[in-house]
Image (cartoon, rainbow, N blue to C red):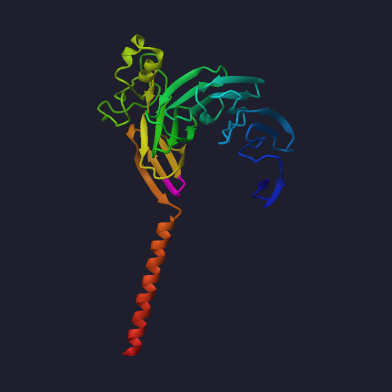
Amino acid sequence: MIWDDHQNKCIGELSFRQKVIACKLRRDRVVVALLSRVYVYRFSDLALLDQFNTLNNPKGLLALSPDSSSTVLACPSITRGHVRVELYDARKSTLIPAHEAELGAIALNLSGTHLATSSEKGTLVRVFDTGSGQMLKELRRGTERAEIQSIAFNSESTFVACSSDKGTVHIFSLAQQQPGGQPGGPQPPQQQEQQDQGVGASSPSLATGNKKSGLSVLNKFLPTSVGGYFSSEWSYAQVKGIESPSICAFGQQPYTITVIGKDGSFIRANFKNGGEATRMSYNRFLKGREEELRLEMGENSGAEKQHETEEGGKDE
């Protein structure tokens, strides 16, 4: 059902024989993901424009470019770890072999030119060019398995961030080396303290602002399976202490990120200097059951004391 909040009424309805896993909307498109199939509709009259099969997609992985100047759709293909990218304006499809394992998360940037993916292992985030399918970046979240809960680009596609069940949001720079050896993005302080991100995260990469392993010089002497670990880039900045499943998004102000938790927490942080981001604000819009019980107990205790006071006054 499509609800128009301005008119306060339902303006369209789509019915399916299977459970709807996910849905993405734009002013001109409605995309629906079922367990193993994706449907694309025109928003104005809900006419079916496209449909195709996917591998079983219980997470409802689906990405639609937000910018109306281009129409790009990404979803799992029929092959494990592969992403199907539909570039409707160019009338072209791209099949990207993103991971060997099952996909865990996918996201498109504003214009649909870049795709970020993670597998179910959650140790790496890879960034691809949607037109050519070429991998642009391999970014390491950590060494331990994790569930990636969200991936987001900033509006300029100079940063990408991911949240996971490890309680940390990792922010990566996507800046490329420019002529003269200067990076295209912000640089961390020269004396920035080493962060505890796992083995291999040592010195900042002057080319991107992300950290790289101090052993990356050994890549050419190591097998590809081992050397790939040392060539990965580690996060430029982090927001730590997230206590519940969360999603992240970049703010309108430069170098700001917002993290929204399932527990009702709302965090805004500034990551300009790299390392652990500085929290700008924190709010909690939902109360947990324990908090509600404490409040109830406090109210009951207050009422009992008031009643005792009243009773004592009557005896006197």
User: Can you say whether 203 is above or below 296 in the image?
Assistant: above
**Farthest-out residue, top:** 221
Q: Is the C terminus in the top left, top right, bottom left or bottom right quadrant?
A: bottom left
Q: Position of residue 271 (x, y in %)?
A: 37, 35
User: Can you say whether 142 is above or below 178 in the image?
Assistant: below
Q: Is residue 257 left or right of residue 39?
A: left
Count the numbered circles shown.
0
Residue drawn at (40%, 22%), measured in percent from left and top?
184
Residue 271 shows up from this direction: no
Q: Position of residue 302 (x, y in %)?
A: 37, 72
Picture quadrant of residue 144? top left
Q: Is residue 265 magenta?
A: yes
User: Can you say whether 153 is above or below 216 in the image?
Assistant: below
**Farthest-out residue, bottom:** 316
Residue drawn at (50%, 27%), measured in percent from left and top?
117
Front-lying residue, 150 or 276 = 150
Residue 311 shows up from this direction: yes
Q: Position of residue 197 (x, y in %)?
A: 32, 30
Residue drawn at (46%, 54%), measured in percent from left and top?
286
The residue range painted magenta reads 261-266
Q: Is residue 12 magenta?
A: no
Q: Position of residue 264 (x, y in %)?
A: 45, 50
Front-lying residue, 60 or 68 = 60
Q: Is the N terminus in the top left, top right, bottom left or bottom right quadrant?
A: top right
Residue drawn at (65%, 50%), measured in percent from left and top?
6
